[in-house]
Image (cartoon, helix red, strand yellow):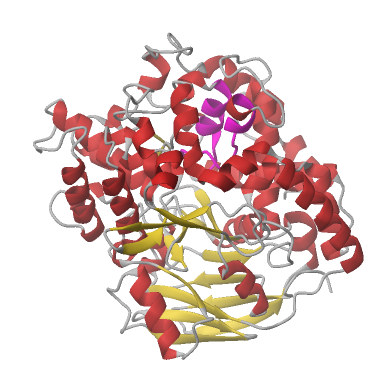
Amino acid sequence: MDAYAGNIAYIDLSAGTVKVKPTPQSMKEEYIGGRGFGIRFLTDMVLPGTDPLSEDNALVFATGPLTGTGIPLGSRYEISTLSPLTGCAISSNSGGVFGWKMKKAGFDAAVITGKAPKPVYLFLDNGEVSLFDAADVWGRTTGETTDIIQQEHDDTKIRVACIGPSGEQLSLITCVINEKYRAAGRGGCGAVMGSKNLKAIAVRGEQKIGVADEDSLNLIKDRIRGKIEAEGVSKSIQDYGTAVLVNIINENYILPTNNFQTAHFEEAEKVSGETIKETIFKKAKGCYACIIRCGRVHEIEGKTGEGPEYEPIWAFGPDCGIDDLIAVTKANSICNEYGLDAVSAGATIACLMEMAEKGYVDHPIRFGDADGMLAVLRQMATREGIGEELADGSYRFAERYGHPELSMSVKKQELPAYDPRGLQGQGLAYATSVRGGDHVYAYLISPEVLGSPEKIDPYETVNKPEWVRTYQDLTAAIDALGMCLFTVFSLNADDYADLMTAATGIPFDAAKVMTAGERIWNLQKLFNLDRGIGMDADTLPERLLSEPLQEGAPKGMVWHRDELLKEYYAVRGWDETGVPTTGKLKELGIH
């Protein structure tokens, strides 16, 4: 036993056929699982020039070897595909219980190609793979879809990952929702499912997930549990959820406000984690094997739901100039129900607000208009009215009206909730992210703001490329292992190597973990380069390069692209235009 389920399902929706093959040993050792498996399959199967919404695109659901083994925070799964939003190879990560149940169903990955002639859903059921007619759930919300599929099989233990109506309508900012509230977000993976007439994947399984050395693994579990519980950042997230960041980021004058026009929101306290705890909070909730339990169950107007997390709070709150917690929570729920990426949806509305205020588009919405925000969001979710144009993200919308510079995005994907003018390392992570504007591919907020594992000056550029490369490679490995990113606050590469070795029996040390992450990162970079996404795309919106911040400690700061990018490419072992050298690829065993 080696912690892997041992099988990969290959589903051709066009032909309606399924093949199940053993998980290759070489894939385990070189790409580990999760994001690594997904990026490797995309590189092998998706040719340059492929339309992301055509049947030639591939969609990969993959777990990691540590998913479902009982390791604290080992619950994650990854969806990888060619993004219709960015044109990049993307992976979208989610937690909950779905990944654990997918492995117990007997599969490390499901590789999906083609397009079904009519709507279907896929069922991975204790080693069996079946396709079912999805006519009854097509057009339904994610919650309704989940309930109906469970009812059809008379089993509430079945876990469902599905798209909502927005994914069916091919909105480029859609995500996949599992267990009604957990999102595999960013990049439009929900639109890829919709383009394939694939409404959902349901999983059911009772197969044992065995490990190579259970006694050793149990000892390591105890060690890392102690490290996680001792970490102050983890404790804060446990108490207030990810929304604990609202006040912290605002106090550092790096909370993007009014579409990144400023970086401080006077009313931030009204949408903070502390206010949530005092008002709408009902209880904490965690993923499988989670000891942090960052999820928030809320109640508003007699209805319960989950969230909102920090990023949606920012997107529908400060970025739109809104301090109404109830409106922000309702917006988050709409995104869950319809399958919209809450970060991109909120940021796109913020872009509309600025364009409307400046007279570039004829619309009554303005910053601070909570009712208008909710109305526009509902239009986006259903592609009605102006929502038809907004549903494909801020870049395409702003470009249509002649002002692409007002889209706060990288590689056409909206930036998240940290202003890079006061975070030189995070700015570099944004610009060089191989899936577009993003924070979870390298969370430099940890050292630059939170002081974990050590505090570094957020305004300095010195040594930042080395920090960014390390976080990018380590995060790629964590995504491949099936672990939660929050473990990065507490654990190091040695811890992940020990877990991998005990669980799988494959000898790993810290260097091998980091090399696997570097291999995944470089392969993803090559995929993008083959599609013309190169050095020119490794940048930030002009506003962040030329308009200095005006308040607080980072006053006068912009993001320093030229010096950071040049050094970053050198640190990576790439040429001066950001292309991996032959020597680097040979070193990593990439052919």
Question: Residue at 12% across / 34% down in the picture?
Answer: 361
Tally of numbered discs: 0
Up the image or down, 479 lies above or below 532; here it is below
Q: Is residue 92 visible?
A: yes
Q: Quadrant of residue 402?
A: top left
Residue in the foreground of this view, choosing between 226 and 283 = 283
Residue in the foreground of this view, choosing between 575 and 460 = 460
Question: Residue at 77% across / 42% down in the picture?
Answer: 514
Residue 400 within the magenta-colored segment of the rendering: no
Up the image or down, 39 lies above or below 12; here it is above
**x, y percentage for residue 331?**
29, 51
Question: Residue at 87% across / 68% down in the picture?
Answer: 214
The answer to whether 499 appears left or right of 52 in the picture is right
Q: Quadrant of residue 21?
A: bottom right
**x, y percentage for residue 44?**
61, 60
Q: Quadrant of residue 118?
A: bottom left
Up the image or down, 512 lies above or below 3; here it is above
**x, y percentage for residue 177?**
44, 64
Question: What residue range appears in magenta?
Answer: 424-448
Q: Is residue 577 visible?
A: no
Question: Residue at 54% across / 77% down in the picture?
Answer: 11
Up the image or down, 81 lies above or below 143; here it is above
Residue in the foreground of this view, choosing between 305 and 141 = 305
**x, y percentage for residue 421?**
46, 19
The answer to whether 461 appears left or right of 171 in the picture is right
Quarter of the image with the N terminus is: bottom right
**Extreme residue toward the top, this view:** 556
**Extreme residue toward the front, this view:** 278
